[in-house]
Each structure stands twice: as structure tokens, then as C-alpha cells.
Image: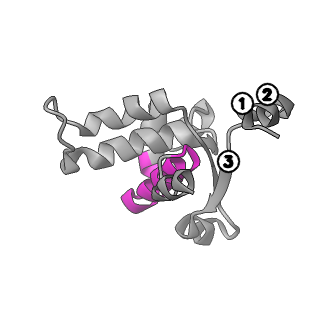
Amino acid sequence: MSIVDKLLKLDAGKLEEKPEKAIEIPRLSELIGEPFMVRCTAITGDRYSELTSVAVSKSGKFEYEKAYKANVLVALESIVEPDLKNEELQKHFNCRTPKELLEKLLNGGEISKIADISTELSGFGNDADEEIKN
């Protein structure tokens, strides 16, 4: 069977499903007294490029000092649970925006971990290169 035949048998709706992953934030689990899970999803290539472009200079060089800002944007876009756009949650933590809430709830390393997971879910991780080669 050719690859075209295989694709024709594929349910096209399955391609629209975004991969997700739940990760535990141990620091918050300890504070709450039960597992605190953050559920992340993949983001589109265009959106990923848009978000990470904040860390690229006009000349096209990656600016490491802006990597955290890019990680915040990627994590914020990727997190589906908890709902950081929830106004009640923002108000409870005295935050005006989902970004402020993210940075209040999570430390820099936790945000970077979520951004890394989102990157992998979106197909941009180091493993993606190996999978494509094989």
C-alpha cells in the first residue's frame, strides 16, 4: 500500500487533535497537600514562531537574555489547566493579567520546564529531528 493510500484511510479529524501532557509542579503540590498538575498542549508552528521571535534580534541572532520572556509566552499559550485567564483566580492572587498570574504561581525554572514540554509537544524538540530522520 502506498503512502497516499495510507493517508486516504486516515481519519482527517485525528490530525486536528493536539497532543497534551500533564506535569506536576512539586513545589505547589507540597503547598496544596496533593498533586498540583499543569496541563499543556501543543501550539501551532506559526504561533510558536511568533512567540519565540521576541528572543531573536533584527539581525536574526538569538538573544539569550530574552529567552525567559519567550518561555513565559510559550508556557502561557500552552497551559490549558489551570485556566490562567480565570478572572476570579487572577483577582485572588492580585494579578491583572494571565501573565502576571503565571509568574506569581510558577518560578522561572518551572515556566522553562513547561515551555520545553510545549516545544516538544509542538514538534520542535530535539527528538523531532531524530524522528524525522528515521
Q: Is residue 22 magenta?
A: no
Which disc, if any, is residue 16?
1
- Looking at the rendered image, the quarter that the N terminus falls into is top right
> Which residue shows up at 34% across the image and 42% down it?
70
Gap between marks 2 and 1 measured at Cα: 7 Å
| Disc 3 residue type (three-letter) | Glu
- Residue 84 in percent (x, y) is at 57, 38
Q: Is residue 126 above or below residue 84?
A: below
> How busy is the neighbourhood of tag 1: few (under 14 within 10 Å), some, or many (20 plus)?
few
Residue 95 appearing in the image = no
Report which quarter residue 2 is drawn in. Answer: top right
Mark 2–mark 3 CB contact (< 8 Å): no
- Residue 66 in percent (x, y) is at 24, 44
| Disc 2 residue type (three-letter) | Ala
Report which quarter residue 126 is drawn in. Answer: bottom left
Which disc, if any, is residue 20?
3
Report helix, strand or loop for mark 1. Answer: helix
> Which residue shows up at 58% across the image and 30% down it?
87
- Residue 14 in percent (x, y) is at 78, 35
> Which residue shows up at 26% across the image and 40% down it?
55
Residue on which the image places disc 2: 12
- Left or right relative to 93: residue 18: right
Task: Identify the magenta region.
Answer: 103-123
- Looking at the rendered image, the quarter that the C terminus falls into is bottom right
Which callout, 2 or 3, points to the residue nearer the camera?
2
Report helix, strand or loop for mark 2. Answer: helix
- Left or right relative to 14: residue 114: left
Mark 2–mark 1 CB contact (< 8 Å): yes
